Image (tube, grey):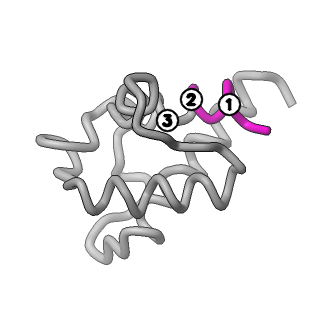
Amino acid sequence: MTPEETRSELVREIKQLIVDALQLEDVKPDEISDTAPLFGSGLNLDSIDALELAMAIGRTYSVRMSQTKETREAFQSVAHLADYILRNRT
């Protein structure tokens, strides 16, 4: 699998994880934009959603999600999360 294919698959997985972990019953994974903001506009997630999503990402991808600037930036979009996971996966 090429790096692009790996990243594309990871993006799909993250979208499904968001829907499942946050129990977004009215959202389908393919409706989530790769680049739209996850907080504020876009999916309009809140801080509790961020915590739940961080825990789910940590469990699923063995990635430590701490309160750093890099982690906050990772939560900008699905694409940012994918890049963060690829860089920090153990």
- Badge 2 element: helix
Horizontal placement of 88 versus 84: left or right?
right
Disc 2 target residue: 84
Q: What range is drawn magenta here? A: 83-90
Give the amino acid type for the residue marked by disc 2 in the picture.
Tyr
Tell me residue 52's x, y (percent). Answer: 41, 63
Disc 3 target residue: 81
CB under 8 Å between discs 1 and 3: no
CB under 8 Å between discs 3 and 2: yes
For marks 1 and 3, the one nearer the N-term is 3
Give the amino acid type for the residue marked by disc 3 in the picture.
Leu
Disc 1 target residue: 88
Please state the total of marks drawn on the protein image. Answer: 3
Q: Which of the 4 quarters of the picture holds residue 87?
A: top right
Above or below, comparing residue 51 to residue 23 in the picture: above
Is 77 contained in the magenta span?
A: no
The one of 90 and 24 positioned closer to us in this rendering: 90
Work out which residue is located at the far left of the displayed protein and give it.
40
Front tag of 1 and 3: 1
